[in-house]
Image: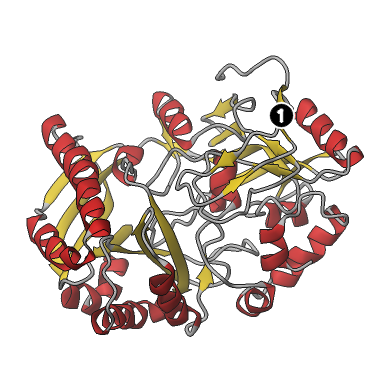
Amino acid sequence: MGISAASRTQSRPEATAWRNWAGNVSARPARSVAPASVDELAAEVRRAAADGLTVKAVGSGHSFTTTAATDGVLIRPEGLTAIRSIDAAAGTVTVESGVQLKQLNAALAAEGLSLTNMGDIMVQTVAGATSTGTHGTGRDSGSIAAQIRALELVTADGSVLTCSATRNPEVFAAARIGLGALGVVSAITFAVEPLFLLTAREEPMSFDRVTSEFDQFVADNEHFEFYWFPHTEGCVTKRNNRSRGPAAPVPAVRGWIDDELLSNGVFQAACALGRAAPAAIPGIARISSRALSARTYTDIPYKVFTSPRRVRFVEMEYAVPRAAAVDAIRELKAMVERSSLRISFPVEVRVAPADDIPLSTASGRDSAYIAVHMYRGSRYQEYFTAVEKIMTERGGRPHWGKLHTRDAGYLADVYPRFGEFTRLRDRLDPERLFGNDYLRRVLGS
């Protein structure tokens, strides 16, 4: 089965500006192309090399860093959107790199299948999400990249490598989260399982209780996360666990009120007011945290894990050792309270188990993720700088697609397998066809 793609490469030879979802990153490539097959993609890579141009692939633009920015050839995703195969018996699905997660989730559900875990946004392309380490929360189940079983990669010489644990295993190990530094991912095979139900329990809770019982919440639930509202003592917790059913989705009217009217419409207005009048933010936060109510519902995974995000923002997220999570979030709260900062977005805390991917933020250690956001157009630098100091003091690893200031010197210290990745990059892309300023900063020259 498949989603139709163009029959030939679409090219935009004029220099057309590209901008990410948040609007904080833009680029003006020399040319922009949308190859419709792996052969066309390989030809575009060879053509760029012959022309002396660098190559970067973009997804849906949900990264906040310049990881995909280029003044060379921009590979757009809309030509590679086929779902090549779904094999329920083998427990796999193979999709091209430009397929969005929402398309993948719907196609799998129609076949009675699902990914095991996912993040809370599903407009990213599969290649963009995995290449930057997109994750959800899980006691035992890891990031989207940790669910990859094979991938197809176009390298700097135009070769097409099929990679898995048994074919080109050293490339497979690294390219699952490759930052676009090893080549252009053209297709991915994910592990899937029979469709299941999750019961979500969302509940307001005090900051002191959540942090005091954090380890127990993580241990007792398959998927646990919480949000703290700065300038308040209020949090909202979410616990997702497998259920025998029956399905009991959020009623349509309440879902619209909670997820569209309140979480997007009213929140958008509150953020705009806060940007215009920062002194109002603590009062708005107190009202928001008190207005939250508990709800429980049961549905298929992607309808529980994901939610619409229409309010635009910029974000920083760090992974710290799970044992350091409570200390880090408490210090973050204390920092906000003693500062003059006014923060309208809640702070999000999630977890993931250790995995074996060299540049995964959970590589080799059980991790907790602490994410901070600011409304688009707000002055975020002071807040993010203070948060980054707290996280780096605990050996934090920045999310590859979210704002940070770390460089290769720091990252080599917090990633034990950093050298394994950079040596592979030297072998696959010695001329840095896939390089840009961001990769020079985080990986070295």
The colour scheme used to paint the residues is: secondary structure
x%, y% of residue 216? 26, 73
What amino acid does circle 1 point to? Glu
Q: Quadrant of the C terminus?
A: bottom right
In the image, what residue occupies the spot 45% across and 48% down?
A: 22
Identify which residue, 41 or 211, lies in the foreground: 41
Count the labels in the image: 1
Can I make out residue 312 in this image? yes
Q: Quadrant of the N terminus?
A: top right
Q: Is residue 435 left or right of residue 107?
A: right
330 is higher (above) or lower (below) than 405: below
x%, y% of residue 130? 57, 48
In the image, what residue occupies the spot 55% across and 19% down?
A: 3
Q: Is residue 51 left or right of residue 25?
A: right
x%, y% of residue 220? 27, 65
In the image, what residue occupies the spot 69% across and 38% down?
A: 74
> Circle 1: is it few (<14), some (14-19), or many (20+) Cα within 10 Å?
few
Can I make out residue 321 in this image? no
Q: Would you identify the image quadrant in which residue 226 lies?
A: bottom left
Q: Residue furthest front?
A: 276
288 is higher (above) or lower (below) than 247: below
Q: Secondary structure at mark 1?
A: loop
Identify which residue, 320 or 258, lies in the foreground: 258
Q: Would you identify the image quadrant in which residue 126 lies?
A: top right
Residue topped by disc 1: 14
Q: Is residue 20 left or right of residue 282?
A: right
Identify which residue, 23 or 231, lies in the foreground: 23
x%, y% of residue 77? 61, 32
